[in-house]
Amino acid sequence: MAYATKLGALTEELVTLLTSTSVNSDPARFNLHRESALRALRHHNFARTNQFDVTSQFDGLDEKFRVLLEDPLADALKERLNILAKLEVKWAPEILHLLLELSDRPVEKSKLENLDFLKEPEPDPGPTLKWKDLIAEDPLLRDKSVWQNVDFGAESSDGEDGFEDSRSELSGLTNTTLQSSVDEEFNQRPEDYAIDTINKEDLDQLRDAQFWQKTPTVDGVQLETVKTTITELQAIREVLFMLLGLPTSLFEILGEGPIVPKRKYALKHASADAFFKVGRSFSEQGTAVMRLRSWAKRDQSIPLIQVLQSSILCRTVEFDARISDIQQRFVSPVKDIVVSLLSVQAEVSSYMRPLVRLSEIIKKLEDERYPHAFRYLELLYDEACTSQLAGDGVIYSFIGRLFFECFKIYLRPIRKWMEDGELTKGDKVFFILEASGDIEPTLLWQSRFKIRRTQDGVLHAPRFLQAAANRIFTTGKSVVVLKHLNQFDSLQSVRGDFELSLDFDSVCNPEVLGYAPFPELFDSAFHTWVESKHHSASSMLRRILFDSCGLQTSLDALSHLYFLADGATASVFTNSIFDKLDTLDLSWNDRYTLTELAQSTFGAIPSLSSDRLRTSVLTLSRKHQDVAKCRRTVKVLSILELKYHLSWPIQIILTPATISTYQRIFTFLLQIRRSSHILSRQRLITDGLTKSSSSDERALYYSLRTRLLWFTQMLYYYLTSLVLEPLSQKMRADLKATEDVDTMIEVHTCYIKTTIDQALLGSKLELIHRTILKILDLGIKLEDAQAANAAANKEALEKQQEMMDLSMASLGLHTPQRKGRSRPLLKEAKGEAESSSDDDEQNIDVDLSILSSTFDEKGDLWYFEKLRNMKTDFDGWVRFVASGLRGVARAGGGGEARSWDTLGEMLENGLDAGGMGHR
């Protein structure tokens, strides 16, 4: 972690120097360069510099200097290489290789005089101060009386101006003058406090105690290879000093690495190998403690890491106090004790074992590349679980308490988020982040706050919190929404002051819950803590959405508007559009006219506000610009869109993405109504086929018309009664049973997906849906063909009558009664048509004969052949739809498959009813 911090600081400095930008001047460009540089440094695959190649190159350079008679230059290079080798710099090969790459003709351009520039300049001491200068400035210094000692305690009455040195009169004063003990106490001089250090015995004892300064001798000859013997008490003192982090003679520190015992010392009564093994055992423990001490002293700016450092320092202080107690026992014993290095080892090991385990965790943390700040929480959590499973109560209690101490700091941003809906600015440890810039209220829930994830898509949070992350995220967003709704004060009044304490004794309680698994204890306690804050915020927001914001009313409005729940009102709206299409009225797709029509018809529904209702019309393709052509297919109705404005709190649940799905269902229902409308408008009593067509044509026409009406009514019944109504009721019941807004969004999204699939609008049924639209177009095609045939028959009858009149006129016969008879017949037919109208149902009759000229069928096909072709297409398409639905239902599963199978069975039964239509 320290390496990552240092690398980041060096990279920022490098980017600033190379690009002349900083985080203050151009933060976007600076962050881009910094991340690119960090990525290149972190993921490079370059090997270390070969130190032997570097050494060989410098040896060659030295030889080159000497061959060219540049011995002083070679000596200077050799001297500095030797100094660098003694420093044991880790990156020395890389540094030397860089210098070799930067060198440019060193023989010609190198000068020994330039080495003087590398020396640090000596500070200027300034001019020296001399007595003659002082005397010149102050002539009074020449008077000797100035330098005499002043006796401030003497008050003589004889008027002496000068003061003599009191030391010369000391003996006489003590002999002749009697002073009180109080005077002697306050008249002590510095020389009275001098201590006589000439004590030979104490000096010898001190030298004997300093065993590290002794070298074994034989006949006055020092033996460097012979081990120095020490006492066991001396060994204990050195061991305790080493464990306290103090420098000792018995152990040495290898750079920043481990502590190792020196082999030059031995106990008098133990073998060298045994003593070395004991020393190595102590050194391993001392290395662990030293790692903790050094890591805890590093500079850290993240509070989550600072609390770990503080906890480690507290535990090392406790350990130091215990070591001091052991030292006290040997320094000033109150009773007889046994001086035993092994007993000290056994006693210290009981204190050291938790620290050694903690040191292993810190070492593992240091060895990882770019660990997250909360990574050590995961390691402590895993260690607590492992130690509990192993039955190690000491380690379990030590690590558990440390874990909860550090976890309290991690809880601070969670508590702030769940209670106040706020995030700490610049916090990169917490797993929730806020988007920059202004966010519309409608996107407050979906876009303003995001869950921070790594590049691999993993949640940026400790593993043991990932199960509760979504609930934490939802609670904070609920508080933010309540603030925007001015309900935060109400939320504060509902909340209680009690909060579950998350510490080791409260959560784990080893005396009572010693056998309960640590993960279950922690999950249960943390879940209770989260629920105490989640329930109040989520339940209040859900209640406000239903009661104050009108979620139920909005659902009713969408049902009436997009699902055409009120059939009578919907028929007024749809029939007006269909009649304009059939009369070739160009205003059928005028959005202003449609908006006025929609507001006037749907505005009568109590749950729907007409002011929020608008319509929009998409642009038609070029081939459908002609209304006479576009009316022949139901697909053209997809350009009509209804838009109902919802309040922004409701749009949190009913997102704009789901409204487009409502529009697709509305379009499908409108297309079915279009085909059913044109088929059901023609009446038998006014049908021209009764007078002009043959019985086969009439039978085939009515058979096909009946089948198409059956298909459209069956399909509409399936969508409204078997899909939309049951799913809508279930969705509303599930919404009332939800706990929070995210669950409400999930319920509504699942409802929309299920509805789309069961309404035959899913991606799996795309081919079946297109086939259904062809069947719906077949209804328009049938009525257009009938209108064209009726117009042709009428024209043929008129021509035949005209020819008969001409023939009768050529024979001299008069037929005045025919015209007279035709008028009563027309009046009689008109009267019959008027009498057949029902007073309760007033439909607008449209004469489809005006469309006969727009019918685009080939003229070489007879009307009867057209009907037979349409019947063949209908039977084939319906059977394809039925078999396709049942096949998809068998391949799939769930509620959608059951609905598809039901519709397929209904269609198959309708086709196989027998006797239906002309065969």
Image (spheres, rainbow, N blue to C red):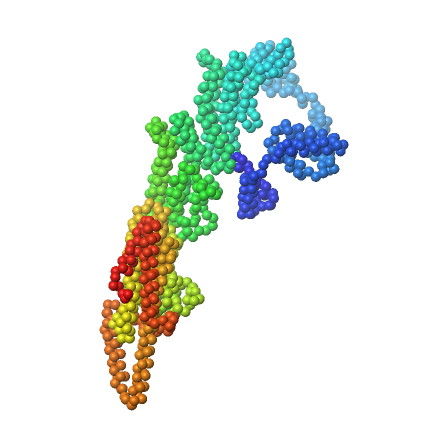
How many tags in the picture? 0
Which residue occupies the foreground of this view, 240 or 660? Answer: 660
Which residue occupies the foreground of this view, 912 or 891? Answer: 912
- Residue 832, position as x, y percentages in the image: 24, 75
- Residue at image position (52%, 29%) is 294
- Residue at image position (52%, 35%) is 2
In the displayed structure, 146 sits above or below 370; it is above
Which residue occupies the foreground of this view, 809 or 1? Answer: 809
Image-quadrant location for residue 220: top right
Residue sitting farthest toward the bottom: 812
- Residue at image position (34%, 69%) is 866
In the displayed structure, 386 sits above or below 45; it is above
- Residue 40, position as x, y percentages in the image: 56, 42
Residue sitting farthest toward the right: 69
Q: Is residue 436 left or right of residue 191?
A: left
Image-quadrant location for residue 555: bottom left
Question: Where does the C terminus fall, quadrant-wise?
Answer: bottom left
Any part of residue 850 in sight: yes
- Residue 500, position as x, y percentages in the image: 35, 35
Q: Is residue 113 left or right of residue 420?
A: right
- Residue 898, position as x, y percentages in the image: 30, 51
Which residue occupies the foreground of this view, 586 or 152? Answer: 586
Any part of residue 420 in sight: no
- Residue at image position (25%, 72%) is 685
